[in-house]
Amino acid sequence: MSISLELLLFLGIIVLGVVSFRQDVRTSRISNVWMLLALGYALVVRLYYILPGIEGLVFRPQSLVNWVVSLVVAVFFWRKKWWGGGDAKLFVCYVALIPSSRYGLVYFSHYFSAFLLLLSTFIPAALWIMWRARRELFLPSAGNVASVPARTRRPWQEDLRVMAGFAALFFATHWLAKSLGAYVPLLGSWVWLFYFIISKGLRRLFRVHPFAVVAVWLLSVVGMLYSAADVWGILKPLGLSFLSAGVFLFLSGQVFSAVDEHLTRVRAQNMAFAGWLFLGALLVWFSRDILFWLNWLRGIFS
């Protein structure tokens, strides 16, 4: 792809980013006129290069599918109130302005390259919200706190029970993976993601029902006896299970706190999300350069 084409599209991103961020901060609204101009500008620039045959791959099928999928995802996020209507339209505009050659990481064989734009937008925003939130390590459920009399509340005991439950779960997973043998890589890559998705439900289960913690520990003991491990083979995964449970609960709690605060700000219309979309677009545009320098630094220190 020619440098001139990329330069023209990059200028469009800069203008749209600055204007949309300024409008979002001042009025919490983004003018539809500017977004229509951005879409028209992206279309005209691409047609200017494709019609003479200079850039025959500007409108590849993957690019069109990527834009259509991005439109569906933007509408879905808007319907779920994960961002505002202006943010959804702004996301579609950035997808139209970013050529496929600028994606440093490719997802779904270019049929949804914009997934990198989602990651580059939401991850920095989540880190910023988590830094500002500075929540406690463990936060008891509001429903549980309200239902328990003040004189009988013991949140630290509930937190220890939750940690013991997750430690038992990780301990049982270790023995299950060990007994399955060949399926250890599969467990290592997907089970933890599954636990994260259902972690809110597991927190409530372990906090309200102590027998659930006991049941998981019994399952761990059965798996441990079945594997007939020595003392060190038991103590090592046991310690790692408690350590993993603490880290897992802290990180998952922070992530969910950031998500809740983001949704609260979006629904209250007091979060200027256009700036994060602009940052995400810039990170995607320079993603190849960022990866190059990261690999260069890794080569120096390796």
Image (cartoon, grey):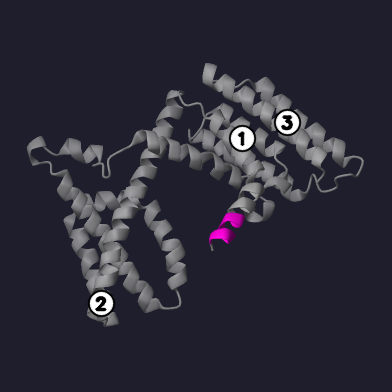
Residue 24 in view (yes/no)? yes
Badge 3 is on which residue? 11
Q: Residue 91 carries which label?
A: 1
Q: Which residue lies furthest to the top in this view?
A: 27
Query: From what the image shows, is residue 235 above or below residue 88?
Result: below
What span is colored magenta in the figure? 295-301
Nearest the viewer among 18 and 61 is 18
Tell us which disc is closer to us: 2 or 1: 2
Q: Residue shown at 31%/51% (left/top)?
A: 249
Q: Distance between the residues labelled 1 and 3?
A: 16 Å
Numbered disc 3: secondary structure:
helix
Single out the mark in the foreground, 1 or 3. 3
Which mark is first along the chain, 1 or 2? Answer: 1
Residue that carries the numbered disc 2 in the rendered image: 232
Task: Spot the residue most to the right.
Answer: 52
**Secondary structure mostly seen in the magenta stretch:** helix
Three-letter residue code for mark 1: Phe
